[in-house]
Every structure is written in structure tokens, then in C-alpha cells.
Image (cartoon, rainbow, N blue to C red):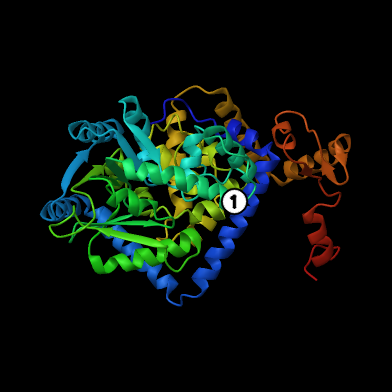
């Protein structure tokens, strides 16, 4: 969990100064947007699917307690074991205890944002348990001791040259330029990890309450290996991931693949119901699922923000976001980035330490338009902003005081035509000191905070009101 305040502005300034990162973000988001649009355009009932998915998620979150109990019974009926974790520390302790009770030495993991959220790798490794990420992007991030940059493609901030140098340092191989050779190196290293693993750990994309089935969606096949080779499979599930009925699962699988990667279907969709049964040749002998709360039940109680839990982690909102496109994932300071990070991170952590994030949005609404479950991101962000402002209003803050004074002056000027006109004429006169090529550059404080990053448009010599009067009114003021 977050221990220090996230300084989104400082992180963003650092990201904006990296031209290599800028190119990577533009290329990635352009490709992702185009792929999604192409995939979605081929589904005539797309909006109906979105509406139905939202209805289902709304039903689940409103009745979360009963659906969790139903899922627990279904998992146990299928031979699995259910563990309840109120927070990150308890969830990690549960997994570590399962490992110790079974003398586990080697763990392989498939990509899971829930395990990133609880910092599971750190807990396992600190207890002497070798833990390896097997998703290629996550594996790269782990090798360079970094953090995921995106919830779907965690290593997009790394270039081919970065990865080549990393593999050369870690594995003693030449610095290959061909992506296929780099992939083969990773495949060889990871295959040995799969064969020696005692435990496999995965996330859960969806869990079906009526059958106890979990669905894991991926494109590399690593999750299937991680959940079938080892004798023990532990799945970490955020408690919001429930789908009531098996027949409803197809709706979410269709939405997820198209929204996340622009595919009709992900390459691998694993449906797992309990451990290996008698007569089956593969699969784990033990199946454990951890129901992770970690603040989610509190979110579910809020009418204003509970729809944050509808998220299916497709990343479409991130790919379309103009803010993310400029500053990237690490600027958000935690596991989740983009619009979903701006709404979920403050609710799963201390609001004071994450107060910047609800303001890390232009409120353009593009995220809402592409969200497969129609989360109203602007509404949730405004609700969180209100909470931040209310908390800050209780503390004396010079910046807030000056902002209030500025808005009072603004309100007075804009409500009095005489002072409005006078201010406009004054600004037109003063701008001569800063005007260049019809833009205002290097304005004095506090406007310097704006012009440090971009120029301000110059004031027109003939304001809009004068143009309107000249065009539509006669000399006596009557309409022409």
C-alpha cells in the first residue's frame, strides 16, 4: 500500500522530459485505439452488450455479500479452499502460510494486478520463496526491479534495446536486435521455472458464483502453465470480480478482449473449477482462492463511487486518456494508472496521500465513452475531488486562501460590465510587454505556472463584444 504522498505533478514533469517515453506512449496508444475501434465496429450489438454488462455489475455490487457466499459454497463444492482477506497484509500472509505448510520453494506467477496491489512478490521472497513472474512484460519489469507501466502491457516503456541489454546482463547472452531471439531467451528461462515450480499463483478475471469457476484471460499461455503444472494453485481475486451465472460470462469475455487488445477473443481463456479430479491427467492437486477486500467493501457502500468496482481491467480508458498519453503510467505512483488509477487508487489508499490523482484528468469523458461497463469516470472523479477539497478546507492553506480570493475577484469583475470592460482594456495594454507571435510568453507569477509549460494566447485588440455589436447592431444599438 502507499506509504508516501504521490506527487503527480512532479512525476509528470519528469515523464514529459523523456522524449523516448513520449514516442513509446504515442505509438502504443495510437495502435491500441485503432485496434479497439476496428474490433468494436464489427459488433452491431456493442452498446447492448455494454449496457447488459453494466446492469450485471451493478446487481453484483449491490448484493456483493450474498454473491460472495454463493461463490464460496460453489468453490468448496468443487473441492477448492476459500480464504477471506480483509487487507493486503492478511492476503499476503495467507499465501505465505499456504506455501510454508506445503514446503513450497519455487513459485511461478501469471500477471495479476491484485498481487501487485498487495505486493505479494516482496512478501514471498522475504520468506525465502523463489518467485518469478511469467508474463513476458511482467518478467522484464521484475528483472529490472521496476513497476508495471500499464495494466495490460506492463513494459511498454522499455525499448527493444533496453530489453536486449537487460537480457545480456542477466543471462550472459549477446545483445540481440531481433525480438524473436529475445523472446526465445525468455521462453527458455521461464520453461525451466515452470517445470520446477511447486506453486502457481494467478489473478482472476471473472469468477462465476453459481459454479465456482474462475476465468483467466491471456495471450501467452503462461497462465495456463502456471495453473496446471504445479501441484498447488492459488488465485487472488478482488471481491468485485463476480459474475452471477455461467451463461453471462460470454458477455464479459467478448467485451474484455475487444476493449483490451482489439481481439475477438483472447488467445487463451482458462476456465478452472476446483482442483484436479480423479482420472484427470493434469491440473493442481490443491486449489485455493483468496477473496481480497482491501477497501473494496467500503467503496461498495458509496453510491457516488461504487461504480469504480464495475471495472474489468481492460485498459481501454488508459489507452484513450489524453493525460496518460502524455505522462505515462509511473506518474500515477501506484499499481493502477490512467482514469481507473485516478478513481481507484485514492479509494484503496489514504485520500490525503493520493489527493493529486482525482485532479489528474481533463474530464473530457473519453474514458466513459470507451468503458465496456460504462463507468461514469467524470462523475466519480468530481465526487473524489469534492472529498479532497472538503478535507483540505479544514486545514489552513495559503494556496487555497489565495485561490478563494482570486475567484472572488473574478466573480466581481465578471458580474460588473464596467469593470469587465476596464479589465479587458487593461490586459490588452499590458500584454505588449509579453506578446510575441500573437502569444503571451513568460508571464509573471502566478501566471508563470502556465507559461512555464505552454504559451498563453494573446488578447484580441477588438474583443468579442465589440465584434458582436459591430456586426449585429446599428449605431443606435438596435438589431440589424
How many numbered circles are shown?
1
Q: Could you say which is closer to the camera, residue 196 or residue 48?
A: 196
Quarter-of-image position of residue 436? top right
Q: Residue, x 43% and y 47% (percent of image)?
A: 135
Q: Residue, x 36% and y 35% (percent of image)?
A: 131
Identify the residue under disc 1: 179
Horizontal and vertical percent position of residue 192: 39, 43
User: Is 215 displayed left or right of 155 in the figure?
Assistant: left
Q: Residue, x 19% and y 49% (percent of image)?
A: 65
Which quadrant: the N terminus? top left
User: Is 180 displayed left or right of 120 in the figure?
Assistant: right
Which quadrant: the C terminus? bottom right
Horizontal and vertical percent position of residue 250: 33, 68
Horizontal and vertical percent position of residue 57: 31, 58
Horizontal and vertical percent position of residue 416: 68, 44
Q: Residue, x 86% and y 40% (percent of image)?
A: 435
Q: Is residue 147 visible?
A: no
Q: Is residue 468 visible?
A: yes
Badge 1 element? helix
Quarter-of-image position of residue 92? top left
Callout 1 crowding tier (Cα within 10 Å): few <14, some 14–19, many ≥20: few
Vertical side of 202 occupied by 40: above or below: below
Amino acid at each position: 500500500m502507499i506509504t508516501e504522498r504521490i506527487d503527480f505533478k512532479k512525476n509528470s514533469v519528469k515523464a514529459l522530459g523523456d522524449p523516448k517515453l513520449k514516442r513509446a506512449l504515442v505509438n502504443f496508444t495510437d495502435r491500441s485505439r485503432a485496434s479497439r475501434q476496428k474490433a468494436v465496429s464489427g459488433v452491431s450489438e456493442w452498446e447492448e452488450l455494454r449496457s447488459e454488462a453494466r446492469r450485471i455489475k451493478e446487481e453484483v455490487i449491490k448484493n456483493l455479500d450474498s454473491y460472495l457466499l454463493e461463490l464460496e459454497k460453489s468453490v468448496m463444492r468443487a473441492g477448492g479452499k476459500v480464504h477471506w482477506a480483509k487487507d493486503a497484509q492478511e492476503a499476503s500472509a495467507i499465501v505465505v502460510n499456504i506455501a510454508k505448510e506445503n514446503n513450497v520453494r519455487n513459485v511461478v506467477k501469471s500477471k495479476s494486478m491484485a498481487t501487485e496491489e498487495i505486493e505479494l512478490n516482496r512478501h514471498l521472497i522475504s520468506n525465502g520463496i523463489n518467485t518469478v513472474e511469467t508474463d513476458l512484460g511482467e518478467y522484464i519489469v521484475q528483472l529490472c526491479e521496476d513497476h508495471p507501466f500499464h495494466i495490460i502491457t506492463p513494459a511498454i516503456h522499455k525499448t527493444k534495446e533496453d530489453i536486449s541489454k537487460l537480457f545480456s546482463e542477466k543471462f550472459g547472452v549477446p545483445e540481440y536486435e531481433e525480438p524473436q531471439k529475445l523472446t526465445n531467451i525468455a521462453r527458455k528461462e521461464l520453461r525451466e521455472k515452470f517445470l520446477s515450480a511447486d506453486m502457481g499463483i494467478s489473478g482472476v478475471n471473472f469468477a462465476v458464483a453459481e459454479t465456482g469457476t474462475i476465468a483467466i484471460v491471456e495471450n501467452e499461455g503462461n497462465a495456463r502453465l502456471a495453473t496446471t503444472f504445479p501441484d498447488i494453485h492459488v488465485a487472488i481475486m478482488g471481491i468485485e470480480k463476480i459474475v452471477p451465472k455461467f451463461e453471462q460470462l460470454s458477455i464479459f469475455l467478448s467485451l474484455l478482449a475487444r476493449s483490451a487488445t482489439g481481439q475477438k477473443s483472447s488467445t487463451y481463456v482458462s476456465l478452472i473449477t476446483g482442483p484436479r479430479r480423479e482420472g484427470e491427467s493434469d491440473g493442481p492437486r490443491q486449489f485455493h482462492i483468496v477473496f481480497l477486500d482491501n477497501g473494496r467493501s467500503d467503496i461498495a457502500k458509496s453510491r457516488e463511487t461504487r461504480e469504480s468496482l464495475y471495472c474489468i481491467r481492460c485498459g481501454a480508458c488508459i489507452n484513450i486518456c489524453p493525460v496518460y498519453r502524455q505522462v505515462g503510467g509511473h506518474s500515477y505512483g501506484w499499481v493502477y494508472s490512467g482514469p481507473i488509477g485516478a478513481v481507484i487508487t485514492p479509494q484503496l489508499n489514504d485520500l490525503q496521500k493520493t489527493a493529486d490523482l482525482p485532479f489528474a484528468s481533463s474530464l473530457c469523458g473519453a474514458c466513459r465513452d470507451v468503458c465496456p461497463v460504462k463507468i461514469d469516470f467524470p462523475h466519480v472523479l468530481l465526487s473524489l475531488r469534492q472529498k479532497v477539497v472538503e478535507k483540505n478546507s479544514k486545514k489552513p492553506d495559503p494556496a487555497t486562501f489565495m485561490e478563494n480570493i482570486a475567484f472572488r475577484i473574478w466573480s466581481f469583475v465578471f458580474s460588473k460590465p464596467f469593470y469587465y470592460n476596464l479589465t479587458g482594456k487593461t490586459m490588452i495594454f499590458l500584454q505588449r510587454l509579453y506578446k510575441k507571435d500573437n502569444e503571451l510568453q513568460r508571464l509573471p507569477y502566478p501566471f508563470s505556472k502556465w507559461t512555464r509549460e505552454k504559451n498563453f494566447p494573446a488578447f484580441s485588440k477588438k474583443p468579442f463584444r465589440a465584434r458582436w455589436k459591430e456586426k449585429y447592431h446599428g449605431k443606435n444599438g438596435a438589431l440589424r
